Image (tube, rainbow, N blue to C red):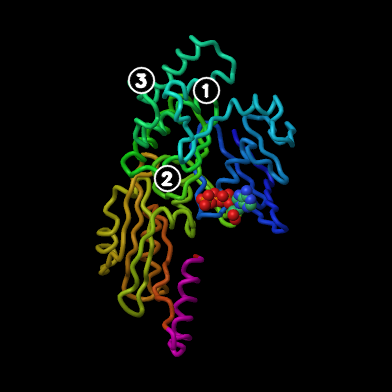
């Protein structure tokens, strides 16, 4: 539904160049909720603004619903008519809502309908339907200043849906909201995605947003997508950066000659007593160093960091047992970062790291 190819954006100001997007290939399938996550300055806003050509890319293409928007021209301030029409199929919501304070809630939702040239009665009917859809029928005549942040964002969503878009772009839409309001706005987006078949591309710096609503996600760094995929697949991929960021588990080894393992439970394995089976089957004392459990895409997923006695090379059978249960198994670094002046530890630590690498490669 949304494809970018080789998308590059270089800002030039006062003789300086900033590459905000560096050959970005993004592919969002119809009907999915796709999250782009990354730190401040990673290029997320530039990416989402290039998708509807609010920002013109320096090179590369953007295709939305089969139409190459970058081919629709327009260099000046005013977008050409075909581009404006194409944008009608793309709604957008913003972190700070961008509502007009002088207009009522209904007036805000009617604004894009006025631009589309709808008559007064039709505008009013459509705006009221949309306000009903977002649960704000009772506030049609209020002004935005009378609404809470969550209600304002619902108005923003209703306004974004006015042109019956197939795609909704969300630029940090929940970043200014408290956790409970964030949840209710995300639930609304999920409902709209399902009810209307709306494809949603959202950018966020909040991992919880990805966990609770996204089918797929991409991690951006320095203008590039460094990892992307279906969230449940990423969670089952050893070494996935997104999986680590979604479920960070801490904890360091209690002593030398230990095997520290990060395991990810998903699907059926999340319901089985795997750890107690491991301790019984291999007569082991297993320590739990850290754990995180949550629901992703409506399914229970968890990560746990456990410690087994002995080095990785001695734990081949227990690790194979865990893998055979359908768990994603990764050896974590049992060795805390080197202390200053701990050079004497070097060869021993290096040996442990090497063993860990060999075991991981199996
Ligand atoms: N109009 C501009 N002119 C010059 N540089 C810009 C402009 N807009 C963004 N940049 C630069 O491009 C890079 C990417 O910025 P962008 O806002 O896309 O990142 P982001 O991931 O959305 O960050 P944030 O979450 O802080 O908004 C940054 O280095 C930023 O300073």
- Residue denoted by label 1: 111
Front residue of 284/181: it is 181
Identify which residue is drawn at 54% across, 19% down.
113
Distance, label 3 to label 1, CA atoms, is 17 Å
Instruction: Give above or below for 288 relative to 34.
Output: below
Mark 2 or 3 closer to N-term? 3
The disc placed on residue 175 is 2
Instruction: Give above or below for 175 relative to 224.
Output: above
The disc placed on residue 353 is none
Q: Give the x, y percent position of residue 314.
A: 38, 74
Front residue of 146/186: it is 146
The disc placed on residue 137 is 3
Q: Residues within 10 Å of mark 1 (few under 14, many from 20)?
A: some
Magenta stretch prevailing secondary structure: helix
Q: How many marks?
A: 3
Query: In terms of secondary structure, where does tag 2 sit?
Result: loop
Distance, label 2 to label 3, CA atoms, is 25 Å
- Tell me which segment is drawn in magenta: 340-361
Q: Residues within 10 Å of mark 3 (few under 14, many from 20)?
A: some
* Mark 3 or 1: the one toward you: 1
């Amino acid at each position: 539904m949304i494809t970018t190819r080789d998308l590059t954006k270089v800002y030039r100001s006062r003789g300086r160049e900033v590459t905000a997007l560096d050959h970005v290939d993004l592919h969002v399938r119809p009907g999915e909720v796709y999250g782009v996550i990354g730190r401040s300055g990673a290029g997320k806003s530039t990416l989402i603004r290039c998708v509807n050509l609010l920002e013109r890319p320096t090179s590369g293409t953007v295709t939305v619903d089969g139409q190459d928007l970058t081919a629709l021209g327009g260099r000046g301030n005013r977008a050409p008519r075909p581009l404006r029409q194409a944008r009608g199929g793309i709604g957008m919501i913003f972190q700070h809502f961008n509502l007009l304070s002088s207009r009522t809630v209904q007036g805000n939702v009617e604004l894009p309908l006025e631009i589309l040239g709808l008559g007064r009665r039709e505008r009013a009917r459509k705006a009221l339907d949309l306000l009903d859809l977002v649960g704000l029928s009772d506030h049609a005549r209020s002004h935005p200043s009378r609404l809470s942040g969550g209600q304002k964002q619902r108005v923003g969503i209703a306004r974004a849906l006015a042109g019956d878009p197939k795609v909704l772009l969300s630029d940090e839409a929940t970043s200014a909201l408290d956790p409970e309001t964030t949840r209710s706005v995300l639930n609304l987006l999920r409902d709209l995605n399902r009810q209307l078949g709306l494809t949603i591309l959202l950018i966020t710096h909040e991992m919880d947003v990805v966990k609770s609503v996204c089918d797929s996600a991409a991690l951006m760094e320095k203008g590039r997508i460094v990892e992307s995929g279906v969230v449940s697949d990423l969670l089952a991929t050893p070494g996935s950066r997104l999986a680590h960021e979604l479920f960070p588990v801490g904890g360091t080894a209690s002593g030398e000659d230990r095997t520290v393992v990060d395991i990810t439970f998903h699907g059926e394995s999340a319901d089985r007593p795997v750890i107690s089976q491991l301790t019984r089957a291999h007569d082991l004392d297993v320590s739990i160093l850290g754990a995180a459990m949550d629901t992703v895409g409506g399914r229970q997923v968890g990560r746990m960091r456990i410690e087994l006695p002995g080095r990785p090379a001695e734990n081949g059978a227990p690790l194979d047992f865990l893998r055979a249960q359908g768990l994603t198994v990764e050896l974590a670094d049992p060795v805390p970062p080197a202390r200053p002046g701990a050079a004497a530890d070097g060869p021993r630590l290096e040996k442990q790291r090497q063993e860990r690498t060999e075991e991981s490669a199996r």
